[in-house]
Amino acid sequence: MYFTGFADEAARDLAGQIRATKELGWKFIESRAIDGVNIHDLPQDKFDLVADTLDKEGIKVNCFGSTIANWAKKITDPFDSSLAEAERAIPRMKRLGTKLIRIMSFARLDDRELNDQMQDERFRRLRILTKMFLDNGIQPVHENCMNYGGMGWPFTLKLLDEVPGLKLVFDTGNPISTLDKSKPKPYPYESSWEFYDHVKEHIVYVHIKDGIRNPEDGKMTYTWAGDGQGDVRRIVTDLLKNGYDGGFSMEPHMQVVFHEESKQEDKTKAMYDNYVEYGRRFEKLVEECRRSIKA
């Protein structure tokens, strides 16, 4: 078991991301963006510098937080861009020795009914992407986010049935803000525990996020892990009790949210301090969960 995180929530630049990781005493980063650019989209010379710097500092990228098939990609759009991202990511992952890549299942079609989500085309594309990665010794992991698989645990299980070799990264905080399309209308919000409990045998990696949803307007206030509605403590305890030995990746969202506009340049110190404190608090939570199992 190891700790890691989306270090672009600690700092935009690589130096700050490395500094925060080292301050926590960790060896891994889940690399998503450096200077606001996803790692698979960096110019080659910039990527080479990043890779050399990470080697020099002794920091490894345990997972690529890619944008492949994510909530910004429509299934009605051409497949070319996703294929190009995957083709760029593979040699970079090999250069860094990274074995996991986070992908999604394309944005929901909220203007269509559930039986009209172009499921067959989603499955076809994800089978192609999954095979590309597996053929290169890389494990793709699907995140329950604003995508087809995130609409409820039955959709994730259907996805896994249709895409051989695909595994899961489970995000504890995403269900809180997501309507459960597997339930009758009016759709309730998902339960993190219920979602986790149905898919846990397929989980190989975990994103740690937590928050509280405003019952009036559905807006999220993100919190320290364990202080919100994401069932973080219960899920972590269950994972450890059942021998989970993968990574826990911090994604605080308390200072910045990756998919929302924010004046990050005004939050440099707050981002850094929050990320480090988040990591320390989560390490403490894990120890408390371990003790509760032994008690």
Image (spheres, rainbow, N blue to C red):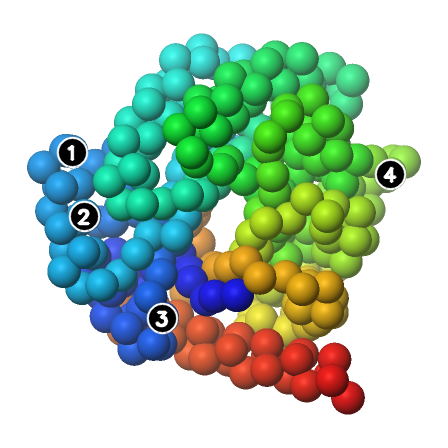
In the rendered image, which residue does mark 1 sit on?
43
Mark toward the start of the polypeptide (1 vs 3): 3
Mark 1 or mark 3, which is nearer to you? 3
- Tell me whether circle 2 and circle 3 mark residues in contact (CB < 8 Å): no
Using the numbered discs, state the Cα–Cα distance from disc 4 to disc 3 in whole angstroms.
40 Å
Amino acid type shown at disc 4: Lys
Q: Nearer the viewer, residue 67 or 62?
A: 62
Amino acid type shown at disc 2: Ala
| Residue 48 visible within the image | yes
Q: Residue at x 33, y 52 (%)?
A: 61
Label drawn at residue 51: 2
Mark 2 or mark 4, which is nearer to you? 2
- Tell me whether circle 2 and circle 1 mark residues in contact (CB < 8 Å): no
Q: Residue 126 lies in what quarter of the image?
A: top right
Mark toward the start of the polypeptide (2 vs 3): 3
Residue 264 at x, y percent in the picture: 29, 58
Using the numbered discs, state the Cα–Cα distance from disc 2 to disc 4 in whole angstroms.
45 Å
In the rendered image, which residue does mark 3 sit on?
26
How packed is label 4: few (under 14 Cα within 10 Å), some, or many (20 or more)?
A: few
In the rendered image, which residue does mark 4 sit on?
183
Q: Nearer the viewer, residue 272 or 88?
A: 88
Mark toward the start of the polypeptide (4 vs 3): 3
